[in-house]
Image (spheres, helix red, strand yellow):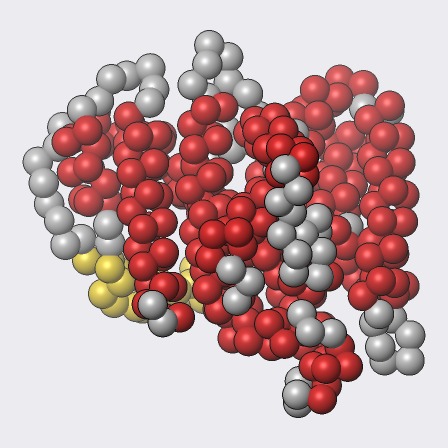
Amino acid sequence: MGRWARTVAWSVGLAAALFASTVGSVLLGSVDLSALDVTKTMLNALAVPASVSVSPRPATLPLVGQTTWVALDVGYLHPFAFEVDRTTRIIVVQLRLPRIALAAVVGFALAAAGTVMQGFFRNPMADPSIIGVSSGAAVGAVAAIVLGTPAVLGVVPAGVRIALLAFAGALASAALVYLIASKDGRTPVATLLLAGVAVQTFLGAVVSFLLVRAGDSLERALYWLMGHLNGASWSDVTLTLPVVLACFALLAVYARDLNVLLLGEEDARTLGIEVERTKRVLLAVSTLMTAVAVAVVGVIGFVGLIVPHVMRLLVGPDHRILLPTSALAGSVFLVLTDTLARSGPGELPVGVVTAALGAPFFLFLLRRREVHAL
């Protein structure tokens, strides 16, 4: 079977698994729903962009006051219109689907970024947080929770302020690691890895200090650090999805270059790859994708470590196949683990479940000596 046929076959299979896991997750809850009604409601929720318009809207900005900004309005066409009662529609569309959709987007982002990081560092133990992205986001979020946010963000909702500072912390941490590791226009992979470990350790100490000083905010800070999807909304999905898809499209363009980098930097230069530029692009795009995901849901571990590794065992090391299949598998994995997290008598943060499932599974692979060489 050719490369494109294998990619399509695996992608279709994983997309079907994602749809099935989504339906199963929607069915789980305090109110019993039929699979048929859930399927009809989900099909009704499908929308195709049909028109775009621009309109002025008033807004109040910090330090500026009343002003007018231009908003982009998109009109959608709904191809399905099945009869579904109002209660079912509210439960599915407004309560359960946003959380599941956000889980799918975040799982997609973390698995794709993890695939790139493992290929970039030529190390199956690498994950998206290896250059300090998650640690930087943790510092930003915990600081916002414990110390409060700048006055300039006063008009922004509290949850958005935390996400913005987490996002800024993630990007700042990754930029610091890159600057430390770079010298004379070159960024050795080994130096980048060691710089990432050092910065992560320091930022971990900062988070610990903030937690000691947290007081009444301790529980909220710990909950964010454990990773969560509770309270997800469609605005979270619309915020993260375009960035994740744009980053993924750019990473897919560089999939062949990533394959060549596996041969080593000298061989890659010989084969015509602009190594330093390619490394910068891969790092920047993976960092942005991870930062967006972590800023919204907190630190969720093992998705970007386990999923790419397992998919590499199944489909091989060719990133032109591995990247899309790992991303889809990450969506399936996080939807299923979040379903498990909320299926017990008390809801658990999804990060706890991914760690509880991921760590033993990875140890099992190590014991069987099946850690796949890159």
**Where is the N terminus found, in terms of image quarters?**
bottom left
**Residue 188 pos. (x, y %):** 84, 70
- Quadrant of the rendered structure where residue 260 is? bottom right
**Residue 92 pos. (x, y %):** 28, 31
As drawn, is 353 to the left or to the right of 193? left
How many numbered marks does the figure carry?
Answer: 0
Q: Is residue 62 positioned above or below 34 on the image?
A: below
- Quadrant of the rendered structure where residue 219 is? top right
In the rendered image, the residue lying farthest to the front is 368
**Residue 371 pos. (x, y %):** 65, 47
Q: Nearer the viewer, residue 148 or 143?
A: 143
**Residue under the point 52% across and 67% down:** 318
**Can residue 343 be seen here?**
yes
**Residue under the point 88% across and 63% down:** 191
**Residue under the point 83% across and 46% down:** 200
In the rendered image, the residue lying farthest to the top is 345
Q: Nearer the viewer, residue 165 or 270?
A: 270
**Residue 340 pos. (x, y %):** 45, 24
As drawn, is 49 to the left or to the right of 83? right
Q: Is residue 17 positioned above or below 184 on the image?
A: above
